[in-house]
Amino acid sequence: MNKEVDIFAPITDLGKGDALEAWRWLVGGRASVRLLTAMGDLFFVKKEGILKKERVYFLDTGTGEVEIASKSWKLFRELVNSGGDVPGHWFKYSLLKELSGQPLDQGNCFSPKILPSLGGEYEKENYCAVSWVVHVDISGQIHEQIRDFPPGTPIKSMNLIVER
C-alpha cells in the first residue's frame, strides 16, 4: 500500500513576521514567502521586470540555493495541484516517505542535523522534526557565513544569533 505523505509543513504562522529575514542577503528585500515544504524548504514570490510579474522561486535551505520554480503563482499552483512533473528536489519525496513514521507537529518541519552544504547526507538518520522558525533562521545564518567559502573548506566555528 502506498501511503500518501503531506509535502507541506503543518504551519499556520508563515505570514507572521519576516520568515525570510535570515535569507534576505540571498533573496532580496522584495521576496515574500508563500509555502514551506515538510523538508524545510521555501517557495517565495518576487515581482520582477518592467511589468512587475510575480515569479515563484524555490529556496533549498539545505544547500542555500535558489532557482526559479514558475513564471507565476497561478501556474505554480496548477502544477503542484495537478500532481504534475515537479523537480524531485523540491519536496525530497523519497526521504519524506522514509520520515513519514515521524509525524510533524504543528509548527514543525524536518531539518537536517548537519546541512547538506556542510557534508550532511540526505538520509533519514540526519533529519529530525524542529520548529520551522528555528530551522529557517539558523540555516539562513549558516549559509550567509559560508557563502564565499570554496567547497571542502574546513569550518572551525560559527556564530549564530538565537532570539526568543
Image (spheres, grey):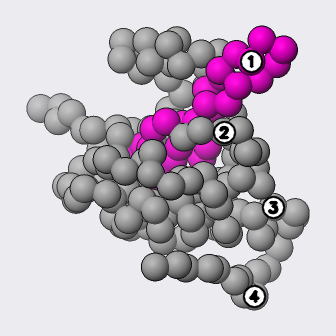
Q: Which of marks 1 and 4 is nearer the N terminus?
A: 1
**Can you identify the residue that label 3 sits on?**
147
Kind of residue at disc 4: Lys
Q: Quadrant of residue 144?
A: bottom right
How crowded pointer 2 is (Cα within 10 Å; few <14, some 14-19, many 20+) is rated as many
How crowded pointer 1 is (Cα within 10 Å; few <14, some 14-19, many 20+) is rated as few
Q: Distance between the residues labelled 3 and 1?
A: 28 Å
Kind of residue at disc 3: Arg
Kind of residue at disc 1: Lys
Name the spot of residue 108 as percent of width and height, x first.
Answer: 33, 59
How crowded pointer 4 is (Cα within 10 Å; few <14, some 14-19, many 20+) is rated as few
Main SS of the magenta part reads: strand
Q: Distance between the residues labelled 3 and 2?
A: 19 Å
**Front of the two marks 2 and 4:** 2
**Can you identify the residue that label 2 sits on?**
31
Q: Contact (CB < 8 A) between labels 3 and 1?
A: no
Camera-side residue of 103 and 15: 15
**Can you identify the residue that label 1 sits on?**
52
Give the residues in magenta: 34-60
Does residue 43 show up magenta in the picture? yes
Give the residue drawn at x 25%, y 56%.
106
Q: Is mark 3 on a helix, strand or loop?
A: loop
Q: What element carries label 1?
A: loop
Name the spot of residue 101 as percent of width and height, x first.
Answer: 19, 55
Question: Which residue is at the far bottom?
Answer: 156
Question: Which residue is at the far left?
Answer: 1
Give the residue drawn at x 65%, y 20%.
54
**Can you identify the residue that label 4 sits on?**
156
Q: Which of marks 2 and 4 is nearer the N terminus?
A: 2
Q: In this view, does 83 lie above or below 159?
A: above
